[in-house]
Amino acid sequence: MAASISRVLRRLQRSSPGIATLPLLQKQSAATSLVPARWLNLQEYQSKKLMSDYDVTVQRFQMADNAPDAVKAAKALNAKEIVLKAQILAGGRGKGVFSSGLKGGVHLTKNPDDLLPLVAQMIGYNLVTKQTTKDGVKVKKVMVAEALDIARETYVAILMDRDMNGPVMVGSPQGGVDIEEVAEKTPELIFKEPIDIFTGFTDEQAMRMAGNLNFKGDLQQQAAEQLKNLYKLFLGVDATQVEVNPFGETPDGQVVCFDAKVNFDDNAEFRQKEIFAMDDKSESDPREIEASKHNLNYIGMDGNIGCLVNGAGLAMATMDIIKYHGGEPANFLDLGGGVQENQVFQAFKLLNSEENVKAILVNIFGGIVDCSIIAKGITSACQGMDLKVPVVVRLAGFNVVSGFKIIKDSGLPIETAVDFEEAAVKVVASLQ
């Protein structure tokens, strides 16, 4: 199926497109790493504005939503060369193709007037890249930025690491490339600086990392200051990861963050209201947005069996066993640990709105979840909407007997199962 389970894994491990996951820093199990689901997505220009606010050096840029304004922006920058970048929440823009026929979402020019026909073929058209669907994403804005030559590229990231019980800065003198490949083939070129959350990122650590990135002389001091500012940004915005690739050196002796992505801790939303207000949901799946309103984690897939579970690990296992028995999951829908009856109702409502869902499998393990609450939510949903697809429910754990009794007493045509495999077999069979 096009929307594979590996895609779900990738989606759950990031909040913004393009963020690299470092295998050498993530030794925890897949099930464990699935738990945090990050929903805040910022466009590139928004991330660069944040960095600029923390005195991190980025290219000068302006935004435009039409061709004439893009030309004006380029002239105002008065740069030797201009880079034009389509703004969508996906990587691979440079090699993308627009529905207008224009090739490439990133273009360089020395003549501002050249932007007029380029932007006219970008704004309002869909850009298809390796990270979008086949239909692509409509471009609404472009970034017009000063183009700087890069004499040398390095890599820097700050992220939370379980093994080190706090933040760690990771750097490599090999930047501008796939950092996972560097870690695999030349691990000696990966440098790590654990950061004491009470002491902070010290001058000594900053100079050492700048040296490990092969910055020399005055550039080493400049790079160290930039690294300290990146850590201030990391703390100031409640980030879980800040990744800069490339963290570059220009021929005229500047240290510049050329491209960066920021992951935010969604639990810090109450402290970061201004940042979360910037959340660009225009490219998100409407079903994901609706699910998030009710604290549900949702990812759409291409199958026909709706999956309603509690816990990311159980969700992955549920999709696996459905596939094993010849079925195709239609979604990943995680109720979470503190689910309430209304959330179950909303989850059913969401599944019932999908035309491709022809059967629903509810797979709940009641640890901290009360199975009777789930059962009430299921029966309430089935009674309160025109639900015409088969429903199979497997409950286990706390108050499971009460849960099954509620379903039985409802008189609704809901099949039940006592174990994992029986439930998968029944829901696949219901489609035949």
Image (spheres, rainbow, N blue to C red):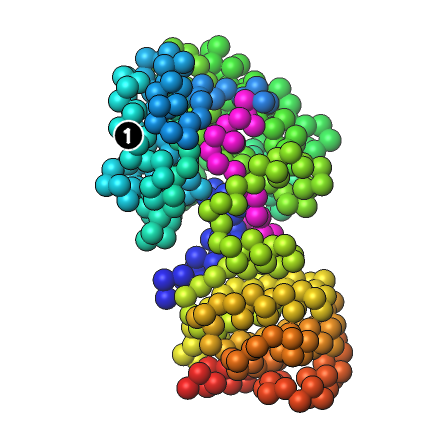
Please name the amino acid that badge 1 sits on: Leu
The answer to whether any part of residue 425 appears in the image is no
Q: Name the quarter where the C terminus is drawn.
A: bottom left
The part of the chain drawn in magenta is 26-52
201 vs 127, nearest the viewer? 127
* Quadrant housing residue 56: top right
Residue 352, x across and y down, in percent = 54, 71
Quarter of the image with the N terminus is: bottom left
In screen coordinates, is 198 left or right of 225?
A: right
- The verdict on residue 48 being magenta is yes
Does any portion of residue 382 appear in the rendered image?
yes
Q: How many marks?
A: 1
Q: Nearer the viewer, residue 332 or 203?
A: 332
Residue at the image point whose x is 59% and y is 70% from the top? 348
**Residue plotted at (48% across, 10% down):** 218
Q: Residue at x 36, y 53 (%)?
A: 133
Q: Nearer the viewer, residue 365 or 30?
A: 365
Q: Residues within 10 Å of mark 1 (few under 14, many from 20)?
A: some
Q: Is residue 236 above or below residue 285?
A: above
Indicate the position of residue 297 as horizontal and vertical percent values. Answer: 58, 58
Relative height, residue 321 to residue 258 (above, below):
below
Quick check: is 195 in the magenta stretch? no
The correct choice, above or below, for 353 with respect to 34 in the image is below
At 69% from the left edge and 86% from the top edge, which residue is drawn?
A: 410
Q: Is residue 301 above or below residue 142?
A: below
Residue 91's x, y, as percent? 39, 41
Circle 1 residue: 118
**Secondary structure state at the residue bearing disc 1:** helix
